[in-house]
Amino acid sequence: MNVESNLPTGLHQRILDNLSHAVLMFDTTLRLVFINPAGEMLFAISASRLLGLSAEDILPGGSPLLAALKRGLQSSHPITEYEVQLSLPNQHTLITDCTVTPLDTHPGDAGLLVELRPLDHQRRVAREEQQIARQQTFRTLVRGLAHEIKNPLGGLRGAAQLLERELPAAELKEYTAIIIGEADRLRNLVDHLLGPNTIAHKESLNIHQVLEHIRQLVSTELPAGIHIHTDYDPSIPHITGDRDQLIQAVLNVVRNAVQALEDNGEITLRTRARRQFTIGSRQHRLVCQISIIDNGPGIPEKLVENIFFPMVSGRADGTGLGLSIAQSLINQHDGLITCESRPGHTRFCLLLPLEQGSPSAEKTTVTERNPP
Ligand SMILES: Nc1ncnc2c1ncn2[C@@H]1O[C@H](COP(=O)(O)OP(=O)(O)O)[C@@H](O)[C@H]1O
Ligand SMILES: [Mg+2]
């Protein structure tokens, strides 16, 4: 991680490695001498390729960050720039707050410490926290309501059955049958609102085998004009999960993409390992990210905020349950499904923490920055 022996070691190194913000250090000639894993992720380039490069090589000319670094060399106080646009070598741009702190306490350590705090990341975390809070409120409400509805409904149904037995004429049973049928319909509706009721049987599994299984399942029902591409990161370690539940969750998302594309278009199944990644407000050391991307018309704007709630559907024959079930199943794995959509590009991300990072997890190469 670092090229000079007087750079952080031991505990300090561990702290830097586990920070969610990017930390970089440049020497007095503006040569990069340190970058932490969050920094590698941000630039989407490994430390080994970045260390030793000059700030000018890493940051395009005219970059406000480069100007801040040059000012930092002349200053003895930290400089903070807000909402700086940062162009990354992978053509992405992002808005970030940055602090440049001159370090000149020890002659050997002189240089500039740079902290980058991308705002897209903060916005994403805030949005996810809000999404989780809304869904929790909804579930609490539904659980309370379900209790209040199901008890009297059971009584009503039982009474109708007793009445049916006592009826003097067979044709009157038509009425009790209506009471029983409607009571059953209401109970089913409440059960659907409550979401899946199964306990997860978790085992260690290869997520790519799960995705390939889904691809085969969907291929049999795919119109000729729709193609499914895969872009897997083979370094992702095994995840601990319930195979059937994960299949169900991903299948619900993929089927929606197929339905949105109608009879032509592209679907991509992509996997990536994410280090130091936050899901909602919790930071995880390693997260498996499964993206399902399609180039269809996108989610109608008036629906997009609410698609994870049950009974929300944009299709005449839809039940509106697919995504709500998928979200509950992924929540049971301490994960989250997020969605972003515009015409021509809809992306659902299933985020699953890989808490017990195996040794291979440590070696996972960082291939992309945190998505917004
Ligand atoms: N990939 C997608 N592209 C466009 N719209 C989508 C996509 N995925 C989901 N949707 C919208 O979200 C709605 C809710 O999906 P879902 O919960 O699975 O219920 P259903 O499929 O029964 O309508 C869909 O009806 C559709 O309008
Ligand atoms: Mg659906």
Image (spheres, helix red, strand yellow):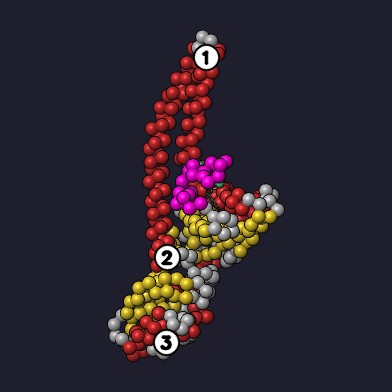
Amino acid carrying mark 1 in the image: Leu
Amino acid carrying mark 3 in the image: Leu
Which is more N-terminal, label 1 or label 2? Answer: 2
Q: Is mark 1 within 8 Å of ligand 1?
A: no
> In which image quadrant can residue 231 be found?
bottom right
How many C-alpha atoms fall within 10 Å of the one at disc 3: few (<14), some, or many (≥20)? Answer: some
Query: Residue 110 at x, y = what percent?
Result: 35, 87
Q: Residue at x 49, y 78 (%)?
A: 47
Q: On residue 30, which mark appears?
A: 3
Q: Residue at x 44, y 78 (%)?
A: 35
Which is more N-terminal, label 2 or label 3? Answer: 3
Q: Residue at x 53, y 74 (%)?
A: 90
The residue indicated by pointer 1 is 172
Task: Tell me the distance, in whole angstroms, between the alpha carbons under discs 3 and 2.
Answer: 27 Å
Position of residue 155 relative to residue 210, above or below, is above
Mark yes or no: residue 331 visible.
no
